[in-house]
Image (cartoon, rainbow, N blue to C red):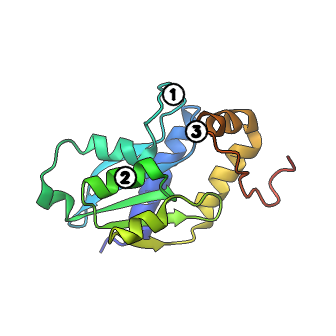
Amino acid sequence: MKDDAYFMELAIMEAQKSLEEGGLPIGSVLVKDGEVISQGHNRLIQNDSVILHAEMDAIENAGRLNYEDYRKCTLYTTLSPCPMCSGAIILYNIPKVVIGENTTLMGAENFLKINDVEIVVLDDIRCRDLFLKFTCNNSEIWDEELAKVGNTTEVNDGNYCNR
């Protein structure tokens, strides 16, 4: 039987795909009734986009679902969803989000919770390591992305780099 670990593995593969394309290593998978209906990864850099976060990419790749279909979905994402992605999750009534890890970046989890979205955090070290290694090796890219949204928060980069 497919479980959270199985679907998170697919999200990590999407994050790897983004990294191989030169983008931020964040991946997402949308699952309905235990089956993958779409996958996505962060495409901000690759597509010179302002909105193609991994979660948005996965939701877009699912196509136009009806209300009942969205209510049967779980969104898997390697990192905690930002306010924009959380808004899309709420807009489309996705009832559950499984997060790989939320220590490097804390998204809008409280916003999801107050809107009755179930949150599961797996604390998967692979998600953390993938993102932190990228930010250490590409600090100028990450700083530029943070500046675009007016965010001056430092990434909790542990022992990976000394900025």
At x 63%, y 39%, the residue is 150
Which sits in the foreground, 89 or 134?
89
Q: Position of residue 83 (x, y in %)?
A: 46, 52
Instruction: Look at 50% across and 24% down and name the residue there.
Output: 48
User: What is the spatial separation of the Cα atoms under label 3 and label 1, in whole angstroms?
Assistant: 18 Å
Choose between 126 and 44: the one closer to the eye.
44
Query: Residue at horizontal 42%, vertical 66%?
Result: 98
Badge 1 element: loop
Figure quadrant of residue 33: bottom left
Which residue was labeled with disc 1? 46
| Circle nearer the viewer, 2 or 1 | 2
Which of the two marks, 3 or 1, is nearer to us in this view?
A: 3
SS under mark 2? helix
Residue indicated by mark 3: 149
Real-space Cα distance between discs 2 and 1?
23 Å
Where residue 122 sits: x, y (%)? 51, 72
The N terminus appears in which quarter of the rendering?
bottom left
Nearer to the camera, 138 or 153: 153
- Horizontal side of 75 relative to 128 (left or right) equals left
Looking at marks 3 and 1 on the same chain, the residue that comes earlier in the sequence is marked by 1
**Where 120 falls versus 61 (above or below)?**
below
- Would residue 145 be found to the left or right of residue 65 on screen? right
Q: Looking at the image, is mark 3 or mark 2 earlier in the sequence?
A: 2
Q: Let me know if residue 17 appears in the view.
A: yes
Circle 3: element type = loop
> Which of the marked residues, 2 or 1, is nearer the chain's N terminus?
1
Name the amino acid, label 1.
Gln
Amino acid type, callout 3: Val
What mark, if any, has residue 87 been given in the picture? 2
Observer able to see residue 6: no
